Image: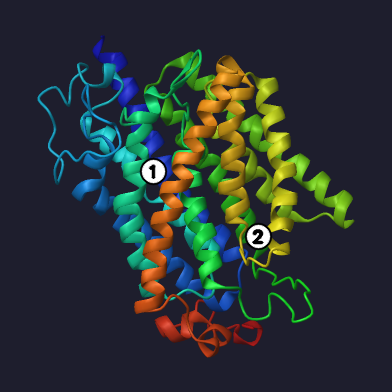
Amino acid sequence: MEAGLFTANNVWMMVCAGLVFFMHLGFSFLEIGLTRQKNTVNILFKNVFIICAGLLLYYVGGFNLMYPGFEDGDIGFLKFAGFGIAAPENGMTPAYADGGYTWWTDFLFQGMFAATAATIVSGAVAERVKLGAFMLFTLLYVGLVYPIVGSWQWGSGFLSSLSFGEAEGFHDFAGSTLVHSVGGWAALIVVYLLGARVGKFGKNGTINAIPGHNLPLAAAGVLILWLGWFGFNGGSVLSADPALTSLVLVTTSLAAAAGGISSFITSTILYKNYDITMFLNGILGGLVGITAGADQMSPNEAVIIGVLAGIIVVFGIALIDRIKLDDPVGAVTVHLICGIWGTLAVGIFGNKAGLDQFLVQLAGIGATAAFCSCFAFIFLFTIKKTMGLRVSEEEEIDGLDIHEHGMDAYPDFRMNQH
């Protein structure tokens, strides 16, 4: 391979790593914007902790759990290649990864993904989780569950060779299941165990909206996430291949746009108002939905996937409220339900479409659901019974910023804290 092409591939992958890192700012802005100002410092602390701890955990053991080097005869479920990272002899040459990038770029790009699962959970538990409990869960989930599930597919584990009929291999291009649903299952479990925020559900069954304090910040967060998704999906090509990279960026953008439009139209028909939060979550639903098959879809198929994801967002958020689960940012709907939809869409559309592939996709979803839900429940239930998951009612009403951090993000605007 020409040195110039190797360098171009590697530079593109490093740019994508930076874009995925930038997504953590988007997640932070979105979570802050859709919650109350009295919890802003707490949300910032959680999100900064996630990226710092996630990268270190991935260095210590996550990378070698996710890419352990499964061999013929291995079950392809769990293997560990050792602590720390050390580059192989060809790690900085075109002989590594078909010339797509170097070993160090490989680690950095994948490491940026590692913390995303916990960031999804952060939004779902906003405004009432104990910071210490959340940090402990993050260490366990990002350090163990995420890389193990990732190894099943991206590390050439059992999902990558799972077959049914004529279909062979679960397909999740950039993580509708392996990233978003992994975080979504944990979000669902913790929202159930944690309970709703004070005032969210009335005694007579009413559902009370708790408005976010900064919608401009939430909108900025979504647009940053959309930009970051160019790295999230575009980098998953694992090279700067012109044809495939450009296709992936087109399908990603079209699904996002279609998800936003269908979501706001659906919510307007149902609720008779133009809801910006539904519009924003529809965009994210489209992005999550296309992530599994962004490399497989035509532009028309990407639009269909996005449209359906946007509709799913509106009805999914309503369903979560109806069953009395309090998810302040819609994380369960956007990341879990739309993640499932996007993964199944690979079996419906694209060049892997067919009943056999659909069943392989369904099996992959089932394996991920069982593993993530069980371990999330074990981790979280143990934490709840020992150190506790939830702050006191007084702390929640006053705000986590004052009680857990001793500071206020907006010291000049206390009058609107509650």
**SS for dot 1:** helix
Distance of label 1 from label 2 (alpha carbons) = 26 Å
Residue 116 appears in view: no
Horizontal arrangement in the rendering, residue 53 relative to residue 327 (left or right): left
User: Which dot marks residue 113?
Assistant: 1
State which quarter of the image contains the C terminus.
bottom right
Residue 118 appears in view: yes
Question: Residue at horizontal 43%, vertical 42%?
Answer: 20
According to the image, label 2 marks what residue?
216
Question: Considering depth in this image, is 290 or 376 the residue closer to the camera?
Answer: 376
Work out whether 241 lies above or below 306. Answer: above
Q: Position of residue 160 (x, y in %)?
A: 38, 26
Q: Residue furthest left?
A: 89
Dot placed on the residue nearer the N-terminal end, 1 or 2: 1
Work out whether 374 lies above or below 73. Answer: below
Q: Position of residue 173 (x, y in %)?
A: 47, 28
Question: Considering depth in this image, is 347 or 356 the residue closer to the camera?
Answer: 356
Q: Amino acid at mark 2?
A: Pro
Horizontal arrangement in the rendering, residue 119 relative to residue 97 (left or right): right
Horizontal arrangement in the rendering, residue 220 relative to residue 275 (left or right): left
**SS for dot 2:** helix
Q: Position of residue 61 (x, y in %)?
A: 21, 47
Q: Residue furthest top?
A: 1
> Counting other residues with Cα less than 10 Å from the Cα at mark 1, is it few (<14), some (14-19), or many (20 or more)?
many
